[in-house]
Image (spheres, rainbow, N blue to C red):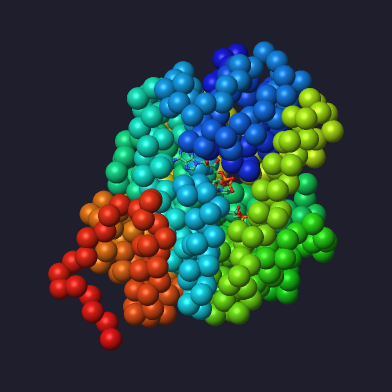
Amino acid sequence: MPDKKFSVVIAGGGSTYTPGIVLTLLDNLDKFPIRSLKFYDNDGERQQKIADACAIMIKERAPEIEFLATTNPAEGFTDVDFVMAQIRVGKYEMREKDEKIPLKHGVVGQETTGPGGIAYGLRSIGGVLELIDYMEKYSPNAWMLNYSNPAAIVAVATNRLRPKSKIINICDMPIGIMDRMAKILKLDSYKELDFDYYGLNHFGWWTAVRDKKGNNLMPQLQAYVREHGYILPDESGTEKSWRETFEMAKNVYALDPETLPNTYLKYYLYPQEVVKHSDPNHTRTDEIRLGREKFVFEECAKITESGTAANSAFKSDEHASYIIDLCRAIAYNTKERMLVITPNKGAVENLDSDTMVEIPCLIGANGPEPLAQGKIPRFQKGLIEEQNSVENLVVDAWTEGSYTKLWQALSLSKIVPDAGLAKIILDELVEANKDYWPELKIGRPEPVLS
Ligand code: NAD
Ligand code: G6P
Ligand code: MN
């Protein structure tokens, strides 16, 4: 392997995921050597708390790595090979509104799906395009691996508005589910599995799961999921809302016994059930404030105060190793088969060529090469085309500043039962997002509902 050392910037350095990524980078320096690591964020104060702790982690394990945390795009994006993007435009304050506004009206309130996902999409598009523009200005040969959500809408936007840019939009949910599949099968890692999968981001299905010898493992997995969903025998460390999601996969699976579903389909196929299990005053954002966010910032403070990360509780995980594996695949042109979001270009025969599908691709120095997934059944095709239209309408609304397109997006979403209700929710979201959304023009004639 060539002995080049790489320069990485984490955009969204203040993210709760940053210490895990840094730790995993440090664990993998033999496979992916780093000479420079930078954090970039537009909230310097939040980022600094993470950076102070990470500086200690780096100094203890690999003092030769140059480390810098900045809010200056020129500093952050100059001389980098990879941008790992994970921004949350509007932060948790706005995620809370995405969840609580729809839920108040009896509609699913969720980070990446339905009205909440649409609202987040309209905030994220500009933020992610800005990162691409910084990358192309200061490091035109770099690649961006983007986790920033809602990845489905962001992918449509980046494909339409920056079609030549070197960005790959990615998601950790299929990896997380495959990790569960591996445990169900009593294997050590999801990397022991080969698979076929198609869909949009947070909207897909496995059509094959095999071991490395080519043996078909679907029947065994389906028999398990039919009974337990993706719930594992020991879920003592799993938060309540995630436990419900993994359990609900059983009901999603029941709709198509030929495949295995992504957990996010529950929001589209069982929205009423989801609302029934939701508390409009205590949503996922509240859980995270008391859970992941609190843990990460307390742990960073402990490291900074004690001056050592030797006893840190941070752990490496699949979320972090996946983005590093992608960097490696590009850096060393490995053509590893990985799941990413990419223009369809005929890979799913009966979907439009420009649909941003999530499918297995060979990843190399020139990006993803999509692998053919054949024709998909009518049920999935219908669902995907509807959802893809929603996501494209959101991008239309962003580019045209069109209220009507946005109202259409909410009304078309399978999660919203009625166009009148869509308008009530939309008007509250417009008000809540006025610092983040483009100004929306109302088409003529003005919509009047009685
Ligand atoms: P977080 O709020 O802890 O961190 C996000 C950081 O982004 C904050 O420090 C914030 O200041 C910064 N930020 C916001 N807007 C910015 C901008 N325009 N420019 C630069 N920085 C900006 O959020 P988190 O929970 O750690 O999640 C981070 C992101 O990763 C979210 O978008 C989340 O949805 C996404 N995520 C995606 C996946 C996936 O499967 N694709 C998995 C996990 C997390
Ligand atoms: C999975 C999804 C991400 C999503 C996250 C939400 O990892 O793939 O896209 O952001 O779940 O998790 P949270 O703990 O923030 O609710
Ligand atoms: Mn995801």
Q: Residue furthest left?
A: 444
Q: Position of residue 428 (x, y in %)?
A: 40, 68
Q: Is residue 61 above or below residue 236?
A: above
Residue at the spot 75% in from the left edge and 59% down from the top edge: 238
190 or 106: nearer the viewer: 106
> Could you tell me residue 323's position as x and y percent?
58, 38
Q: Is residue 391 above or below residue 90?
A: below
Position of the N terminus by quadrant: top right
Q: Residue at x 41, y 41 (%)?
A: 128
* In the image, farthest residue toward the bottom: 450
Q: Is residue 222 visible?
A: no
Q: Residue at x 73, y 46 (%)?
A: 295
Q: Taking the image as drawn, is residue 394 in sight?
A: yes
Horizontal side, residue 151 vs residue 185: left or right: left
Location of residue 7 (image quadrant): top right
Badge count: 0
Instruction: Specify whether 58 is left or right of 103.
Output: right
Residue 46 shown left or right of residue 237 in the figure: left
Q: Is residue 153 left or right of residue 164?
A: right
Q: Quadrant of residue 298?
A: top right
Residue sitting nearer the eye, 30 or 432: 432
Which quarter of the figure is the C terminus placed in?
bottom left
Q: Residue at x 53, y 54 (%)?
A: 93
Say if 139 sits above or below 183 in the image. above
Across and down, in percent, residue 193 comes to 67, 49
Q: Position of residue 82 (x, y in %)?
A: 50, 28
